[in-house]
């Protein structure tokens, strides 16, 4: 393989809080560290509060206000205004510059078209990365719309169908496609006929999420982030298991680092299950503090549900990978019985649970370990674990980039 230093034009949707696209950020950081040149152009979103050693040019497409938003979104439905406007802005900013390839990442459809059109004009290969697909949760398809205005609902089905046609066309045109799970990979191949599709999972930042044995005075089951209502996430197996264990709330707690909406949801569910005594609520914490909370955890909780068209498919939550990085026992309830369960099994990361008894047995075993040591440490498969570091995944992309650039 050539060791040529590549010049990569990166196109993306906007960087938004709280995580600011770790999949893209760490890829760009690693490319720069390996001596490649990265130039990112994206839609303007939230203020960029993270450090970066590569240029990011933000392009503001909306002026603000309902009238501006409405006119431009109607234009996008009819004429694909947003892609065309973004493409023009990008072309102005890169005029006179030279690149070896284009990499584009999207959570839905934007800016896939811009990447392919600019690639065709400049005779450059294009790698498209798709992070989410509407089909992974058909029952929640309206979440892919950026609006919830009731008067626009009659147009929603048309809007979604049009965007899926556009997305599939662009994925088929790309030189290569990457995506986040085997389920997404199979779907893209079926829908588009694209044969150059590679699964590159979400993962953990190996420079940040490292194991550390931190003693604690109480056995703590930790959850960070948002909680989604049933049927997307189902904590019921955990609640049922807590009542089976002979462990008092003074010795065992479920610590929720979540926003107010999520807290209200869990409070109601815990009350209905009669497990309120074990619940502790701390409010949402910044991304920079998450690794500390995971080090202090005895078990890291991941909430999912069994994969189907209502609950979703191919959901590979970053929470799992971060827990894998710090080598803490993972309790996934309830098991998706799909992609995530497979990775938990292959990495020996913990339990992907299908019933309350196995949750109780798992927690009892980890509680005994905590009593003996003052902390827990999961004996993960280190070779498998290494495959899911974002740095290793960046090397997967570099290999793809070099192959198509040559």
Image (cartoon, rainbow, N blue to C red):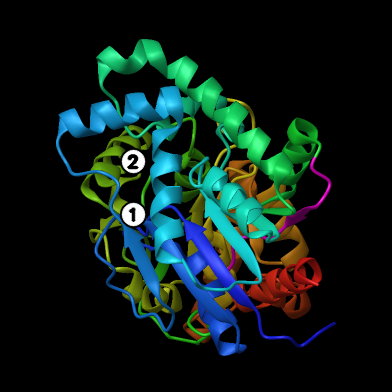
Label 2 vs label 1: CA separation? Answer: 9 Å
Closest to the observer: 188 or 234?
Answer: 188
What is the number of the mark on residue 386?
none
Neighbour tally class for label 2: few under 14, some 14-19, many 20 plus, Cα within 10 Å: some
Q: Position of residue 55 (x, y in %)?
A: 40, 76
Relative horizontal placement of residue 399, taking residue 267 as reference (left or right): right
Queried whether the magenta region covers residue 202, the answer comes back as: yes
Which residue: 42% across, 18% down? 156
Q: Assign the N terminus to one quadrant of the image.
A: bottom right
Q: Position of residue 347 (x, y in %)?
A: 73, 67
The image quarter containing residue 125 is bottom right
Which residue: 40% across, 60% down? 92
Residue 205 visible within the image: no
Residue found farthest to the front: 96
Residue behind mark 2: 270
Q: Main secondary structure of the magenta part?
A: loop
Closest to the observer: 236 or 13?
Answer: 13
Residue 157 visible within the image: yes
Relative horizontal placement of residue 373, taking residue 287 as reference (left or right): right
Q: Position of residue 239 (x, y in %)?
A: 44, 44
As drawn, 42 above or below 207: above
Stretch of the chain drawn in magenta: 194-203
Disc 2 and disc 1 in contact, CB within 8 angstroms:
yes
Q: Assign the C terminus to one quadrant of the image.
A: bottom right
Question: Which sits earlier in the primary sequence, circle 2 or circle 1?
Answer: 2
Residue behind mark 1: 278
Queried whether the magenta region covers residue 11, the answer comes back as: no
Which element is circle 1 on? helix
Which residue: 79% across, 33% down? 190
Which element is circle 2 on? helix
Which residue: 30% across, 46% down? 61
């Amino acid at each position: 393989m050539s060791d040529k230093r590549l010049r990569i034009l990166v196109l993306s949707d906007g960087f938004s809080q709280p995580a600011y696209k770790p999949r893209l950020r760490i890829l760009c950081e690693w490319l720069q560290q390996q001596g490649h040149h990265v130039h990112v152009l994206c839609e303007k979103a939230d203020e960029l509060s993270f450090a970066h050693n590569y240029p990011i040019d933000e392009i503001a497409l909306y002026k603000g206000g309902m009238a501006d938003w409405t006119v431009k979104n109607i234009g996008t439905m009819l004429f694909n205004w947003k892609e065309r406007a973004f493409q023009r802005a990008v072309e102005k900013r890169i005029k006179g510059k030279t690149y070896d390839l284009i990499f584009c990442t999207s959570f839905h459809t934007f800016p896939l078209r811009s990447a392919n059109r600019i690639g065709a004009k400049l005779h450059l290969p294009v790698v498209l990365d798709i992070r989410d697909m509407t089909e992974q949760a058909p029952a929640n398809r309206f979440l892919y719309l950026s609006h919830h205005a009731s008067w626009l609902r009659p147009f929603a089905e048309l809007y979604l169908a049009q965007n899926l046609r556009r997305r599939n066309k662009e994925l088929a045109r790309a030189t290569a496609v990457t995506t986040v799970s085997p389920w997404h990979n199979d779907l893209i191949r079926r829908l588009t006929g694209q044969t150059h599709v590679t699964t590159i999972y979400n993962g953990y930042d190996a420079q940040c999420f490292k194991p550390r044995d931190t003693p604690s005075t109480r056995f703590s089951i930790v959850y960070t982030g948002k909680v989604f209502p049933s049927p997307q996430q189902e904590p019921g197996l955990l609640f049922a298991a807590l009542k089976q264990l002979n462990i008092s709330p003074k010795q065992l707690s479920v610590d929720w680092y979540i926003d107010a909406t999520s807290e209200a949801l869990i409070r109601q569910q815990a009350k209905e299950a009669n497990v309120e005594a074990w619940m502790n609520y701390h409010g949402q914490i910044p991304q920079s503090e998450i690794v500390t909370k995971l080090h202090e955890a005895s078990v890291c909780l991941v909430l999912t549900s069994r994969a189907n068209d209502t609950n979703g498919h191919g959901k590979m939550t970053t929470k799992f990978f971060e827990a894998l990085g710090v080598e803490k026992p993972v309790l996934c309830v309830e098991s998706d019985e799909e992609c995530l369960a497979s990775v938990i099994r292959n990495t020996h990361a913990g339990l992907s649970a299908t019933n309350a008894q196995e949750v109780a047995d798992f927690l009892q075993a980890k509680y005994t370990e905590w009593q003996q040591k003052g902390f827990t440490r999961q004996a993960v498969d280190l070779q498998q674990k290494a495959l899911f570091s974002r740095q290793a995944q960046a090397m997967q992309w570099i290999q793809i980039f070099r192959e198509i650039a040559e």
